[in-house]
Image: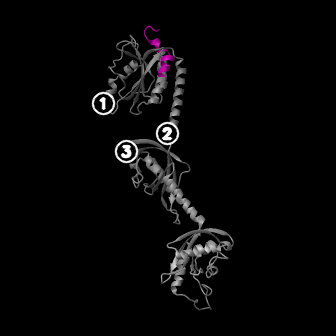
Amino acid sequence: MSASRRSGATDELGPEGSEPEREGPAGSDLLAALLDGMDAALCAFDADGVVTHWNREAERVLGWTAEEAVGRAGFAGWAVRSADAEEVEARLMSAMDAPGRQVNEFALLTKDGRRVLVRTQSAAVRGPDGEPAGVYCAFSEVHAQIDLERSIALSEALLEDAGWGVVLVDADLRPAVVNAYAARALGAGRTSVLGRPLGELLSQGVEELESALTHVLAEGAPPAPAELWVTVRTPEGERRRCWRNGFVRLSSPLAEEPVPLGVGWLFQDVTEARQGEQEASLLRFRTQQLHRAARAAAECESPAEAAAVHLDFALAGFADHAVIDRVAEGGADSDRVRLVRIAETPSGAPGPCRLDGRAGLPVLYADGHPALQCVERAGTVRAGAGSLRGDAAREWAVARQWPQDTVHALCTVLRSRGRTLGAVTFLRTSNRTAFERADAVYAEDVAAHIASALDLAALLPGEG
């Protein structure tokens, strides 16, 4: 169907066997075909405001056909309400005298009487002499434009203002778009991470993340968010983080068959929450261990055996080895403190604490040994092999009378009834992290149970 003005019926055949009547040049039909093939609703007016063109998309939006629209003087009486006709016509035709395009919004009437809010873009059409010869107008339903603007606004908000990371990963699993939150989480600038393999950004957890992204590309998004622990490479060093991740497969909306463009990866840092949960769980476990140890120690025949039982319970999930040293004859107030070992865990193999110290011979601790410092200060002392490795680390441990695989130590004083009775030392191998402040608090609780609840003072000479 032609979108141009005709003097007679359009696109209709004449008598059988005859050619259709043509009144304009061939270029007019070409223009009509081009207008009809466009996705935008288009119409045009001559200098008198008469409709000269009306394409198929305009028919779809308003329901009026080209035969019904072309040749009418403006929209009055059919495409707009009579009360609005004068204003609408004035705003449309004002484009003839204005430079560039003019954008307007107003309500049009469909053929079945519905009102449709449209957004128009109008511009003047110049004649051969350069003078305004009419106006062309492109229009679309505003709700479609609003939907597009909302989609764009949402995309911008996600990339700029969202409280979680947004990364668009391409089919090669490399970041293509990164928002500010994600850039901070990855420890780099927004542009510096683009196109880089994830293995350059993460030192641990990258295999699990790439496996999840590959699954989303092939199968689609998982039914629920997934939490991953990763280690991020940053200029300041590596950071261990826990991310809660969601994934969306991105496919081209223009293809008949889904063509994966990449993955929308959204994540939020939940490290503090997960660490808090772990610490609370660890605290509950340690409290339960102290309670179990107290019940088991109550059945022991001797204070030394009760102390060993406390160590057995305390070591679970806390340390690899432990020793208990009591103050030798002369007490902690003498010029030189000497310690006698009364219990220790076996080194090289698991097993319960062994009781020792029957001979009463002092342990050959060198000056400045952490256990001696602990007794002298009546507090807690932490020590470690630091950067030593291999034979140097083993020599460090053996020199302190500890198992040779020790790299971290925590010495806590034993006090009862206002007196310093000795020290308990907890030892960790390289498989564990160094002792922290929370570990020191737990060690002090264990020491208090050993010293006061079991009255280790009874093991001192002359104390029964």
The residue nearer to you, when weighing 112 against 399, is 112
Instruction: Pinpoint residue 431: horizontal percent, then vertical percent.
Output: 40, 34
When asked about the image quadrant of residue 358, the answer is top left
Separation of marks 1 and 3 at Cα, in angstroms: 30 Å
Is residue 161 a member of the stretch shown in magenta? no
**Image height of 36 relative to 426, above or below:** below
- State the count of labels: 3
Task: Identify the element where label 3 is drawn.
Answer: loop
Q: For the magenta stretch, what is the residue range?
A: 446-464
Residue 400: image location, x then y, percent: 34, 23
Q: Main secondary structure of the magenta part?
A: helix
- Per the image, label 2 sits on a secondary structure element best described as helix
Query: How many angstroms separate mark 1 from mark 2 (CA)?
Result: 36 Å
Q: Considering only order in the chain, which callout, 2 or 1, is on the residue closer to the N terminus?
A: 2
Which sits earlier in the primary sequence, circle 1 or circle 3? 3
Residue 407, image x and y in percent?
A: 37, 30
Residue lying furthest top: 462
Q: Are marks 1 and 2 in contact (CB under 8 Å)?
A: no
Instruction: State the mark number for residue 272.
Output: 2
Q: Which mark is residue 392?
A: 1
The amino acid type of the residue labelled 2 equals: Glu
Residue behind mark 3: 235
**Distance between the Cα atoms at labels 2 and 3?**
21 Å
Residues at discs 2 and 3 in contact (Cβ within 8 Å) = no
Residue 462, x across and y down, in percent: 44, 7
> Please, which residue is most extreme toward the front here?
97
Neighbour tally class for label 2: few under 14, some 14-19, many 20 plus, Cα within 10 Å: few
- 273, above or below 168, in the image: above
Q: Is residue 1 left or right of residue 181?
A: right
Classify 10 Å Cα crowding around label 1: few (below 14), some (14-19), many (20 and above).
few
Placement of 104 over or under 317, stated as above or below: below
Q: Is 304 left or right of 15, judged from the image as shown?
A: left
